[in-house]
Amino acid sequence: MGDWEWPLILFTVLGQVAIGIILMLWWLDRDRDRNHLDNLLFKRGVYVSGTLLALALLASLLHLGHPEAAYRALTHLGTSWLSREILLFLLTFLAWIYLFWQSRQQTSRHTPGSGTSTITTAEIAAAEQQTGNRSLGLGLTSVLGLLGIVSSAMIYVLPRVPAWNNVGPVLFFLLTTGLLGALCTLVLGANLLQAAQKKTLLQWSLGCTIVSLLIYLIYGSMLSVSLEGATSLNFLLSSPLFWIRAVLGWFAPLLLLVSILKNPQIDKNNLIFTVTFLAGLGEVLGRALFYLSATGIHITALF
Amino acid sequence: MSKQLGFLHNSEKCVGCRGCEMACKNEYQIDATPQWRKVFQLREEDFSLPTRMFFSMACNHCAHPECLRVCPVEAYTKRDDGIVVHDPNRCIGCRLCTMACPYDRPQFNPVKKKVEKCNLCYQRIDKGEKPACVAACILGALELVEINDSLDQKTGVLKTLPGLPSPKITTPSIRFIGPKQGKQIRRD
């Protein structure tokens, strides 16, 4: 069985939330004709995702025996997914710096039409250019971040660990990105998102929760094929942490998200905050269990 | 790679004295926790008759080493003679190789905060000497051999033993001469 790998739990979950937020902002930004992405939400999202990404990268260093030599991890891109992960996360951070610069540009620039009765052609062109740059930055950061997350997951696809040697890690990591990214964007944009945008993000969160639950059921049934996989499954089913994770990360969010979507009159913001908190805890526990339940093929002779 | 060096372990000769373990510790002054070489006892229930047999295992210098594949800092290299060498000066202690090796042979040293493993005494081999563990085996149960088809075709040479992970994962460069079963005679 594995250990409580706190640096890895924090690195993966925080990194995935950060990239999830950027991904959701990009998604919202693409629908410019009907729903405009609020500038303040864009700035909030960029600042929060950058902070989380920086914390994630710092946490990853704590896993190493010699963090001062972490730069060497970029030297085996040919076969090592860990090298690829580090490269892609660093590129994501560079792309985020471009986003940060874009968000600062928005503060310093004149809002088109403000203070004047007419909007000049130059102002419209400048605004369009700015929106284009923002979209480019969001898209670039999202794509690099998603590739980084896939690389993170591929590190664990090891023939030695049957519970990981499948598509499971990739799906789990992407679903965490989708779920927590959407929920955190809902929290950040509680008073800034339009009703249609909120509804889309809530539906997306519900979809991620349902898919996550279904995939876990299939994954669990596949584990029993090998001896080591069955050991992982037994560990999960007999662990109280797994059932707490199931309640916090799947069942409670499922019920709350359905009730938010079905009852437009209820106080959505408080419930969204509650769902985000519960799902966040559920994902952290789920990631801890991912490491704890790992059982590798090993020598079974006595020593 | 022109050839593949490896170990041939004869479980019929091995008495489990752990002399090979100690020779390895003495040669490299390894800290207490990591054990580059370890003697295992085969489980009696893996055989049809009661059998007390041992095998000794260090890094298997696999033909397809997972440690080398996953290492992000290129701390592992494979020499022309097939020896998988770990360079502790490059290691950053990420421990991914310890997760990837089905034989648990790269081991994390909590004092040095780096991974260590057997390098098949390549410096001794380069001087024409035997590895320390092979030289120390008083019964000649452990040999340095070239792993090739002619070895695999010899009678009694096995690629694995009960209780070992499938050799398909990394193609380990170790062969075994398995234990011979004792005869059980009933007096009635």
Image (tube, coloured by chain):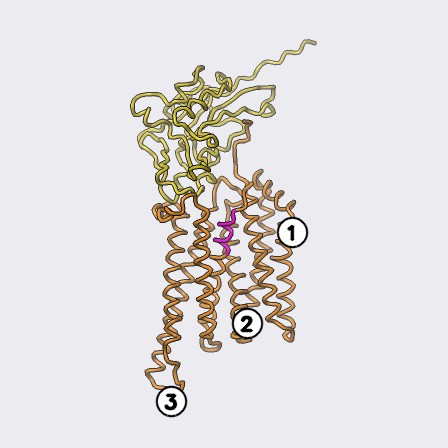
Per the rendering, the colour in which chain A appears is orange
Q: Position of residue A50 (x, y in %)?
A: 43, 62
Note the chain letter of the yellow one: B
Q: CA distance from mark 3 to mark 2?
A: 32 Å
Q: Amino acid at mark 1?
A: Trp
Q: Residues within 10 Å of mark 1 (few under 14, many from 20)?
A: some
Q: SS for tag 1? A: helix
What is the magenta range? A5-13
- What type of secondary structure mainly makes up the magenta span? helix
Residue bearing the label numbered 3:
A118
Q: Earlier in the sequence, mark 2 or mark 1?
A: 2
Q: For the view shown, which residue lies furthest in the bottom direction?
A: A117
- Front tag of 3 and 2: 2
Q: Residues within 10 Å of mark 3 (few under 14, many from 20)?
A: few
In which quadrant of the rendered view does residue A103 lie? bottom left
Residue A190: assigned label: 2
Q: Amino acid at mark 2?
A: Ala
Q: Is residue B66 visible?
A: no
